Image (cartoon, coloured by chain):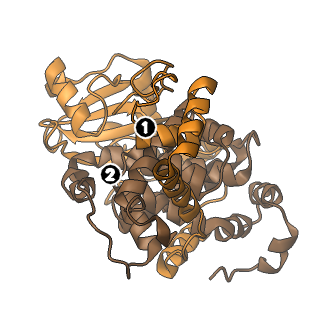
Chain colours: A orange, B brown
């Protein structure tokens, strides 16, 4: 990706104003249109355009691009709109799930108490191995399952995933700097993107749960990958965007 | 489309009022908000996604996140801008995660499009040309020229300096003018 900063006066993109023979590029016309040129270069370019119908024609082509882009949005596909509408109707009201931590803790505490009471009655001690809890326990939901929100495919609760932010990453099979750099590239990140947290999971084959920055700084991306994650094949098993605590 | 209870009230309520109603427990307010902007949001998702299916999934993820996180909205921008930003972020994150899968499929857009067939609908030609742009340039020019946000609003939405927005738009427009062959056929304008 090229540098996105505005070109400095005198750079190759901004020729000296006194060079009447200097060819004008399409990129320079686009910079003039976008208002990224300094006053002297812009004035020189406008003069060139007024003297040269071909340049005026090329600038008009750029204006046509803007004009054509400004058209109305086409209709969104009805089936997709209906699907999303149904998903919104089925979604829990705000304040549940990850949206309101205080309320979630209250709900979680009540759910936990209820589930523990059930466990006492039946005399069963439930093993709450959160790191490998199946999404739908065959014997019904455990207390841990009831009180800890989790994303589909994720082997840990949101809460425990976010706790990884507070301890050094355990990269296991990806601990080699070249391997984790390659894996990050495979996931579409820069090889230097910081790993915010990580843990290794071994049940069902070696896997690594990585926490990487999300586009929204208030969130973090949880990415479950295989031990052979690399630039050419990240082997992504599951992913979720979590709101930072 | 948009047939849901409470629709008769939608024209009476602003975006802010609908969002506040949603937070207060109105079960249909957020859906009203979605239907108010669903065409624009789907177009934005489509142009920042690998394919229509990914766009639909990213759009749904984004709206569910907005639905869930509405109480945290600080009203430091318009509700429309807030929704748009969440959708764009969702699509960009998804593209990044799926980059290893998308590399081959996006390659087709990185080649020159050749002479456009005059009968092709302008909107389709523009979409194809937009998909040929680098993602950052595409997001900037879609936000400014297609969705009509100002440079300042776009900079805030995307979290980048205003000069960077202008620069990305300039590069994008220059490439679009070439790929759409507008430089060859100005008289068609």
| Subunit of label 1 | A
Q: CA distance from mark 1 to mark 2?
A: 55 Å
Which residue does the image show at 11% across and 37% down from the upper left? A228
Closer-to-camera residue (A16/A10): A16
Which residue does the image show at 70% across and 65% down from the upper left? B33
Closer-to-camera residue (B137/B67): B137
In the rendering, at what x and y percent does residue A7 appear?
Answer: 48, 24
In the rendering, at what x and y percent does residue A1 appear?
Answer: 33, 33
Graded by Cα atoms within 10 Å as few (under 14), some (14 to 19) or many (20 or more), the crowding at tag 1 reads some
Q: Quadrant of the N terminus of chain B?
A: bottom right
Dot 1 corresponds to which residue?
A24
Q: Is residue A118 left or right of residue A174?
A: right
Q: Residue furthest right?
A: B12
In the rendering, at what x and y percent does residue B27 appear?
Answer: 72, 67
Dot 2 corresponds to which residue?
A153
- Which secondary structure lies at badge 1? loop
Which residue does the image show at 64% across and 36% down from the upper left? B156
Q: Are marks 1 and 2 in contact (CB under 8 Å)?
A: no
Which residue does the image show at 50% across and 42% down from the upper left? A29
Closer-to-camera residue (A180/A163): A180
Graded by Cα atoms within 10 Å as few (under 14), some (14 to 19) or many (20 or more), the crowding at tag 2 reads few
């Amino acid at each position: 990706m090229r540098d996105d900063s505005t070109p400095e006066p005198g750079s190759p993109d901004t020729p000296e104003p006194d060079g009447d023979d200097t060819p004008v590029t399409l990129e320079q016309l686009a910079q003039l249109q976008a208002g990224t040129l300094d006053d002297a270069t812009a004035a020189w370019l406008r003069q060139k355009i007024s003297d040269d119908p071909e340049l005026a024609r090329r600038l008009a082509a750029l204006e046509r691009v803007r004009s054509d882009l400004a058209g109305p949005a086409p209709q969104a596909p009805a089936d997709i709109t209906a699907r999303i509408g149904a998903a919104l109707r089925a979604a829990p009201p705000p304040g549940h799930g990850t949206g309101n931590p205080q309320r979630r803790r209250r709900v979680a505490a009540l759910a936990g108490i209820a589930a523990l009471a059930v466990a006492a009655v039946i005399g069963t001690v439930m093993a709450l191995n959160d790191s490998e809890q199946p999404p739908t326990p065959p014997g019904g939901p455990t207390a841990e399952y009831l009180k800890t929100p989790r994303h589909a495919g994720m082997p840990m609760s949101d809460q425990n995933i976010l706790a990884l932010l507070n301890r050094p990453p355990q990269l296991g099979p990806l601990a080699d700097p070249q391997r984790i750099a390659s894996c990050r590239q495979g996931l579409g990140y820069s090889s230097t993107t910081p790993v915010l947290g990580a843990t290794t999971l071994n049940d069902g084959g070696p896997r690594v749960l990585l926490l990487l920055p999300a586009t929204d700084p208030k969130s973090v991306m949880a990415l479950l990958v295989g031990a052979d994650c690399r630039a050419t094949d990240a082997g992504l098993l599951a992913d979720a965007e979590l709101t930072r605590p | 489309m948009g047939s849901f209870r409470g629709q008769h009230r939608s024209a009476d309520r602003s975006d802010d009022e609908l969002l506040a109603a949603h937070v207060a427990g109105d079960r249909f307010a957020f859906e009203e908000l979605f239907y108010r902007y669903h065409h624009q949001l789907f177009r934005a998702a489509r142009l920042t996604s690998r394919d229509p299916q990914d766009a639909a999934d990213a759009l749904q993820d984004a709206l569910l996140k907005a639905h869930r996180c509405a109480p945290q909205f600080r009203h430091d921008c318009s509700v429309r801008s807030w929704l748009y930003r969440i959708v764009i972020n969702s699509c960009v994150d998804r593209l990044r995660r799926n980059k290893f899968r998308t590399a081959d499929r996006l390659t087709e857009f990185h080649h020159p499009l050749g002479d456009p067939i005059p009968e092709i609908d302008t909107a389709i030609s523009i979409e194809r040309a937009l998909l040929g742009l680098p993602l950052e340039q595409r997001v900037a020019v879609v936000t400014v020229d297609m969705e009509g946000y100002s440079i300042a609003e776009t900079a805030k939405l995307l979290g980048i300096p205003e000069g960077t927005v202008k620069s990305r738009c300039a590069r994008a427009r220059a490439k679009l003018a070439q790929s759409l062959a507008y430089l060859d056929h100005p008289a068609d304008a």
